[in-house]
Image (spheres, coloured by chain):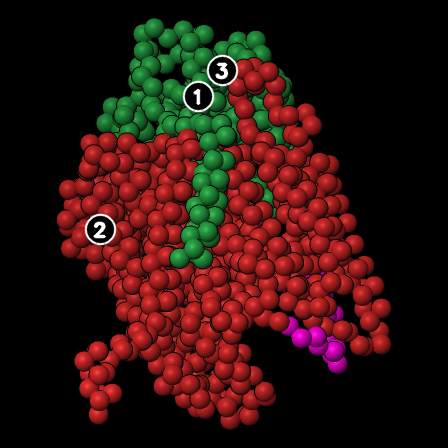
């Protein structure tokens, strides 16, 4: 019995010694992110940017990679607005942004649009970013929250905050239908995802069911194009049936991609 | 013993049977629709919160979006209940899957050498595994009950995703039971001649089924970490069961668990041998259990040495899948747990080395190498100190301001992985040196080129150590962060070269070597405590690393697909983690004592009672 008692005591002491190590280390609790209630009526530029800073360090998990350890550019060490404008002006820039705010938004929701040299995914030759789109899981920032992060990034170096203060809460996302695919990253992918070519002539396809989109940029303004996608029944094109559905699962990124693409379609009427 | 060609052909044919069986099972699994047979369960789950209404089949239904009120409450933390039961199931599952692997190897060695001692030892190892099997099943049943009771919607979703694959798992479980019992109880009936081949084939089948069980169960775990074969937005099934199973982390986890299980199983049966050694009353018993303990330690450390390589592969895949997930584990809140990991792994290495050093006293030749022990010990301790230095944690601006600075100016450089890689690879290299010295302790090398051979070995050790240090320093401190992982390739190769060349050169040098007598059982009793330290550290480590692997999902049941909105969806403080892991380890220890006791009891025979006094007197009178 003694033969067993000593090793047993030894084993228990060893187990407790390992447990003791956990007590001398910092005790932190990692909370799951919670959607914060934002009182839109009381929102100021300062409080909006402060919310952005909170999101940058918390729910947005930006600081996890954007820090001094070099996994991603340390955004706190340089003027991101100035750098954004430089990148938009680069000859090789392939994104859609025209200004710093647009670039920052694009880098948040479509990080691979511009990959900073040396920070691409391994083996991608800096064509693919390892950063997740922040409007998608696991981060899932809302439009208001994305705006807040942009406001914070603009304000931290004393630049004017150009992002508009939200006036009303965006419509709550409806639960995704059974097999809703992921957010499209290009206009072509968005056209394919929402089946636009089934009714409209667009790109290389022809369809007489709805008005042709090959010249829509000449016929409609950017706002009219946006309205006709968001609320297809608002204005019915003459001579065509009112059958265009709404797209409740279309993300704002996809909407932007489509509007920008369609506004550029100024070909001849077919 | 060389195999006659007929035997070899028979062996190959026999070997094909389990391979075909596994292929058949995988084919069945791959051919099954993801949701086919889960309709009943899915119908039950039809009312799951906010499941898409228009889903045509259960597979079309995405992951349910749960609210806090959807989780059943029992008055205790559901996560802790599931955590402890799952951990116990994993401990015992690892043991029963691993032991037959090295038992089969030992049995084969016994058969080839004709040495019955190997056969007896292998049979005794299986005795431990057999008792553990029943406990594994008990905890497996308890785990399933707890999961369906406490997380019904989550389990409903997993059932819809994996569908009939769980039936394959059930079939495999029955086959595992069948082969295990026939293999154990048929041991003596199938001991010699051709019958031994039948027995070995049964062992191979047992391991083939066991390993398939492991990889099937792993697919559930890796699906939760990095889902594949489902729509990323809704979680609806879009791929075949094969696409669901072969996520990016599946194979890294398969390899990691396969090796870790063997190391863990070796360590546990080593404790059994140590327990029997300390309780032994005769020199023969002591010699037997000393040898058994040595074999167990050898198995555990041998499987442990490649584990860091499997670990790096796993983490590299985690980073490739989600950099955020990787950083959370290695540089976020979970990074502190690697301090404990360092303590645990260093305990394992120190215990393993100490056992080898004390084991050199079994032979007079060991004295020749004793002077090297203190230098190996210094390297191990220095490696431990570097490894135990906390990882550099990501601080926010506010935290830096509160702390008065970021990472420590002197110790900070030791807080990144390349520094720790240098430490761990040097520790592995010099642990192998302990092995090499132990193997040489009972031999006098007689080949003429022995001086050249030794010089070559020394050169290999020096170059490999320099490589490990240079690669760590260069990639760690003079290149971009994303290339830091590049250092591990050179370090892994250097370590592998040391091990492989060490084995090859020694094997050549041992030809014609004079063998000194080995006195099994002549080791100090304190050496046996190393055999207790090993399973304790392995058990704690297994629970800790399992927790880290699971926690990187943060507040997701299935990462990015199904959110965890339960009251336990936070990452608990480290002391809480320590308490749960300690509780599970203590519980495992209690069950282990029971298993050892049962195994011991089965070999105990009651002494026949003395004749009654009256009968004795009558006998005397007659």
Would you place residue B14 above or below residue B157 in this image?
Answer: below
Q: Which residue is mark 3?
A: A152
Q: Colour of chain B?
A: red
Residue depth check, mark 3 versus mark 2: number of the one nearer the observer: 2
Magenta segment: B497-518
Inspect this view and state whether residue B33 appears. Answer: no
Inspect this view and state whether residue A20 appears. Answer: yes
Classify the position of the N terminus of chain B by image quarter. Answer: bottom right
Q: Residue B4: x percent and y percent? A: 55, 92
Disc tally is: 3
Seen at 28% across and 23% down, the residue is: A171
Between A82 and A13, the one nearer to me in the picture: A13
User: What number is the disc on residue B490?
Assistant: none
Q: Left of B109 or right of it: where is A148?
A: left
Q: Residue B344: x percent and y percent? A: 53, 45
Question: Do the residues under discs 1 and 2 have CB atoms within 8 angstroms?
Answer: no
Crowdedness of circle 2 by 10 Å Cα count: few (<14), some, many (20+)?
A: some
Quick one: SS at disc 2?
Answer: helix
Q: Which residue is mark 1?
A: A55
Q: Which residue is mark 2?
A: B145
């Amino acid at each position: 019995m003694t033969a067993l008692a000593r090793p047993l005591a030894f084993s228990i002491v060893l187990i407790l010694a390992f447990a003791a190590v956990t007590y001398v280390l910092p005790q932190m609790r990692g909370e799951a992110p919670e959607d914060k209630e934002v009182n839109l009526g009381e929102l100021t530029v300062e409080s909006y940017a402060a919310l952005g800073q909170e999101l940058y360090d918390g729910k947005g998990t930006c600081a996890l990679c954007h820090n001094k350890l070099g996994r991603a550019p340390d955004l706190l060490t340089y003027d991101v607005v100035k750098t954004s404008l430089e990148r938009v002006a680069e000859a090789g820039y392939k994104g859609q942004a025209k200004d710093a705010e647009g670039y920052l938004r694009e880098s948040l929701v479509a990080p691979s649009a511009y990959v900073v040299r040396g920070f691409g995914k391994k083996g991608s030759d800096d064509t693919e970013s390892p950063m997740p789109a922040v409007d998608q899981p696991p981060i899932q920032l809302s439009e208001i929250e994305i705006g807040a992060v942009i406001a914070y990034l603009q304000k931290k170096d004393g630049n004017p905050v150009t992002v508009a203060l939200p006036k009303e809460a965006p419509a709550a996302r409806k639960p995704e239908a059974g097999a809703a695919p992921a957010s499209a990253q290009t206009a072509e992918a968005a056209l394919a995802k929402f089946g636009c070519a089934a009714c409209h002539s667009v790109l290389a396809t022809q369809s007489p069911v709805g008005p042709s989109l090959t010249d829509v940029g000449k016929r409609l303004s950017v706002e009219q194009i946006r309205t006709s996608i968001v609320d297809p029944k608002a204005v019915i094109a003459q001579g065509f049936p009112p059958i265009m559905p709404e797209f409740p699962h279309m993300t704002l990124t996809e909407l932007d991609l489509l509007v920008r693409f369609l506004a550029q379609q100024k070909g001849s009427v077919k | 013993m060389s195999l006659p060609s007929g035997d070899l052909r028979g062996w190959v044919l026999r070997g094909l049977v389990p391979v075909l069986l596994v292929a058949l099972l995988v084919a069945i699994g791959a051919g099954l629709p993801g949701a086919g047979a889960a309709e009943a369960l899915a119908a039950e789950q039809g009312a799951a919160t906010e499941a898409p209404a228009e889903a045509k089949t259960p597979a079309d239904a995405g992951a349910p979006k749960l609210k806090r009120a959807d989780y059943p409450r029992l008055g205790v933390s559901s996560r802790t209940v599931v955590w402890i039961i799952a951990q116990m199931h994993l401990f015992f599952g690892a043991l029963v899957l691993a032991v037959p692997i090295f038992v089969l190897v030992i049995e084969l060695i016994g058969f080839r050498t004709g040495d019955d001692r190997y056969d007896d030892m292998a049979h005794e190892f299986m005795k431990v595994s057999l008792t553990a099997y029943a406990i594994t099943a008990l905890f497996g049943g308890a785990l399933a009950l707890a999961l369906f009771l406490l997380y019904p919607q989550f389990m409903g979703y997993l059932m819809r995703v994996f569908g009939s694959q769980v039936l394959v798992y059930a079939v495999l479980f029955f086959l595992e039971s069948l082969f295990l019992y026939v293999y154990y109880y048929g041991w003596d009936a199938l001991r010699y001649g051709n019958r031994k081949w039948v027995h070995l084939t049964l062992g191979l089948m047992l391991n083939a089924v066991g390993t398939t069980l492991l990889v099937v169960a792993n697919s559930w775990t890796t699906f939760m970490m990095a889902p594949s074969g489902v729509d990323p937005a809704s979680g609806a099934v879009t791929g075949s069961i094969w696409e669901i199973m072969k996520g990016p982390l599946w194979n890294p986890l398969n390899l990691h668990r396969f090796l870790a299980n063997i190391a863990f199983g070796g360590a546990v049966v080593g404790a059994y041998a140590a327990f029997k050694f300390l309780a032994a009353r005769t020199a023969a018993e002591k010699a037997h259990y000393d040898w058994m303990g040595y074999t167990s330690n050898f198995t555990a450390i041998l499987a442990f040495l490649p584990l860091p390589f499997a670990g790096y592969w796993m983490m590299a895949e985690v980073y490739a899948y989600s950099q955020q997930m990787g950083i959370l584990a290695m540089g976020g809140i979970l990074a502190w747990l690697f301090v404990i990991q360092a303590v645990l792994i260093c305990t394992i290495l120190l215990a393993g080395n100490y056992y080898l050093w004390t084991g050199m006293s079994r032979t007079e030749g060991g004295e020749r190498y004793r002077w090297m022990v203190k230098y190996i010990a210094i390297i191990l301790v220095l490696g431990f100190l570097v490894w135990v230095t906390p990882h550099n944690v990501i601080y926010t601006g506010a935290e830096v301001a509160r702390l008065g600075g970021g990472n420590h100016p002197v110790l900070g450089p030791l807080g990144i992985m390349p520094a720790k890689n240098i430490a761990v690879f040097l520790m592995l290299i010099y642990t192998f040196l302990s092995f090499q010295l132990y193997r040489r302790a009972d031999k006098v090398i007689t080949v003429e080129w022995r001086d050249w051979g030794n010089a070559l070995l020394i050169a290999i050790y020096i170059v490999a150590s320099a490589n490990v240090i240079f690669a760590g320093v260069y990639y760690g401190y003079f290149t971009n962060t994303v290339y830091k992982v590049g250092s591990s390739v050179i370090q892994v190769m250097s370590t592998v070269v040391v091990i492989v060349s060490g084995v090859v050169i020694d094997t050549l040098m041992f030809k014609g070597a004079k063998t000194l007598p080995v006195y099994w059982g002549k080791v100090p009793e304190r050496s046996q405590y190393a055999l207790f330290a090993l399973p304790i550290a392995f058990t704690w480590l297994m629970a800790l690393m399992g927790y880290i692997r699971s926690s990187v999902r943060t507040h997701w049941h299935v990462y990015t697909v199904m959110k965890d909105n339960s009251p336990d969806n936070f990452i608990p403080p480290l002391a809480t983690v320590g308490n749960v892991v300690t509780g599970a380890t203590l519980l495992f220890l209690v069950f282990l004592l029971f298993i050892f006791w049962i195994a011991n009891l089965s070999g105990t025979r009651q002494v026949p009672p003395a004749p009654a006094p009256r009968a004795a007197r009558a006998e005397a009178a007659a």
